[in-house]
Amino acid sequence: MVFNKNIVFIGGIHGVGKGTICKKISNESGLIHLTASQVLKWNEISKSDNKLVDNISTTQERLILGLKNLIEKDKQYLLDGHFCLLNSKGIPSKIEEETFDYINPRIVAIVIDDVEKVVERLEKRDKRKYDSKILNELQEMEIEYAKYLSNKYSVPYIEIWNSNYKSLLNII
């Protein structure tokens, strides 16, 4: 099952502010906000708070199954998730294209921020150290992959910097 171009996909690295921005967009647009973590029931499958994913492929299969049970074809959604994740070895890895083939986004958006600010946020939130070099690499990979997916699906690509989400609202 491929979804009916009724999902705006918004990605970005952990701690970049996706959730906060998505709540604002949802309130102003009426889109139903879903997070990939909620759909995955991340707390049930994650053994720790290190943001590493043992099996990205299996995790994405679970996401698609969860979305199949939630998405209604006559409603519009804002799905907050990731274009890339840290694999079990802590290496940035792209999420399989097949996942996005199913999601079939009508807009591809990405939240971007200064990595040092993100590191500060994450360290404060999670009470642990983060490697800014790895997070920068992850963010750069997410940006490039989001652009690629936007081109592949011939849908708009929107970058959200400094919490300025108005450009996305304008095309929703």
Image (cartoon, rainbow, N blue to C red):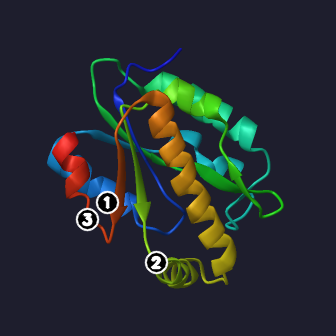
Mark 2, other Cα within 10 Å: few <14 / some 14–19 / many ≥20? few
In this rendered view, identify the residue nearer to me: 169 or 158: 158
Asked if one can make out residue 38 in the rendered structure from this viewpoint, the answer is no
Mark 3 is on which residue type?
Asn
**Which label was assigned to residue 21?**
1
Q: CA distance from mark 2 to mark 1?
A: 16 Å
Mark 2 is on which residue type?
Asp
Residue 67 drawn above or below residue 86? above
Question: Which residue is rendered at x = 63% and y = 80% of the image?
Answer: 132
As helix, strand or loop, the secondary structure at mark 2 comes to loop
Mark 1 is on which residue type?
Ile
**Which label was assigned to residue 164?**
3
Percent coordinates x, y for residue 131 in the rendering = 68, 79
* Nearest to N terminus: mark 2 or mark 3: 2
In the rendered picture of this protein, how many numbered marks are placed on residues? 3
Find residue 18 and report its image quarter. Answer: bottom left
Percent coordinates x, y for residue 120 in the rendering = 52, 85
Question: Which residue is rendered at x = 67% and y = 66% of the image?
Answer: 49
Question: Which residue is rendered at x = 59% and y = 35% of the image?
Answer: 63
Residue 74 drawn above or below residue 132? above
Is 111 left, or right, of 61 in this rendering? left
Residue highlighted by disc 2 = 114
Residue 80 drawn above or below residue 57? below
Find residue 74 and report its image quarter. Answer: top left
Q: CA distance from mark 3 to mark 1?
A: 9 Å
